[in-house]
Each structure stands twice: as C-alpha cells, then as structure tokens.
Image (cartoon, helix red, strand yellow):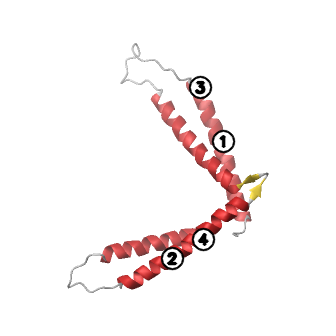
Amino acid sequence: MMQRADLDKKVSILGARLNDIALINKNYALEDEPKHLFEELNKSMKALSELVYRIHVTNMETIDNGTTITAMLTKEEILKMRINTLIRIKESASIDSRFDKTIYTILINKAELQKELDECKSQLEKLDMKLQQLNWQTELI
C-alpha cells in the first residue's frame, strides 16, 4: 500500500507541475520541460495502473474463511454507506426548538436505530481490523 500511496503522490505532483507551466509568460524562465514531465507522468501512471491491477488480482484470489478480500472490501463500503445513512436519519428524527412539538412527531424508533447503528459500527471495526491484518500478511501477486 505504501507503493501505491507513493505513486499516487508522484502522479499528483507531476500533474500540479504541468498545471503550473501549462500557460506561462513568454519572458518566464522555464524550470521544467513539459515533454519530460509528460513522460514522467505517463511512466508513473503506467506503473500505478499495473500496481492497482495486481492489488485487484490479489484481493480476488486471497480468501480468508471462505471470503475474498474483494468481498470484504465490498462489505466495508456498504457498511460505511449504511452507517452514514443511519446517522442522517437519526439526525432528522430529532425535534429541537425549531419545531413545534404539537405539530411534529417522530416516526422513527431512535433506540432501535441507535442499536442498529452501534451494530454496524461494531461490524465495521471488526472488518477493518481483519482487512488490516490481511493487508500485512498477504503478498502482492
């Protein structure tokens, strides 16, 4: 993962350097040659593409207790989405001083909602720990 972060950063820096010289004053002394920067950018993007592919293959082929890392990552993404949705619902189900309590009523059982939210957060925490463990133990294909 460090290799991916390094490549992501390099691509970002090269892109920023190209942005900086895309349009310059004719009298400005050019520090970086665009052709050279584009070559470096393309080389870095190719390396990143190959690395990401290897990560995806590794995630599909690595199985822990009958589940691939890809399936675990999918579950993680959906759990995060569910948690964020439940948090927004919980916030919407609160009556504060802005609302007239004689007109508005809460239709959501906030205790059940909180219980489900806590369960999802617990599942996510366990899943994150498992993914981190597998990340350290798994060799990239």
Question: Is the C-beta separation of discs 3 and 2 under 8 Å?
Answer: no
Residue 76 pos. (x, y %): 62, 48
Residue density around tag 4, few if under 14, some if 14–19, many if 20 or more, within 10 Å: some
Quickly name the residue at label 3.
111
Can residue 100 be seen in this snapshot?
yes
Three-letter amino acid code at the position of disc 1: Ser
Return the disc, 4 or 1, that comes first in the chain's sequence: 4
Q: Residue at x 42, y 75 (%)?
A: 14
Three-letter amino acid code at the position of disc 3: Ala
Q: Quadrant of the N terminus?
A: bottom right
- Left or right, 63 with respect to 18, comes to right
Q: Residue furthest right?
A: 65
Marks 3 and 1, how far apart at CA: 16 Å
Residue 67 pos. (x, y %): 74, 52
Q: Quadrant of the C terminus?
A: bottom right
Residue density around tag 1, few if under 14, some if 14–19, many if 20 or more, within 10 Å: few
Three-letter amino acid code at the position of disc 2: Ser
Return the disc, 1 or 2, that comes first in the chain's sequence: 2
Marks 4 and 3, how far apart at CA: 45 Å
Can residue 2 be seen in this snapshot?
no
Marks 1 and 2, how far apart at CA: 38 Å
Quickly name the residue at label 2.
44
Quickly name the residue at label 4.
51
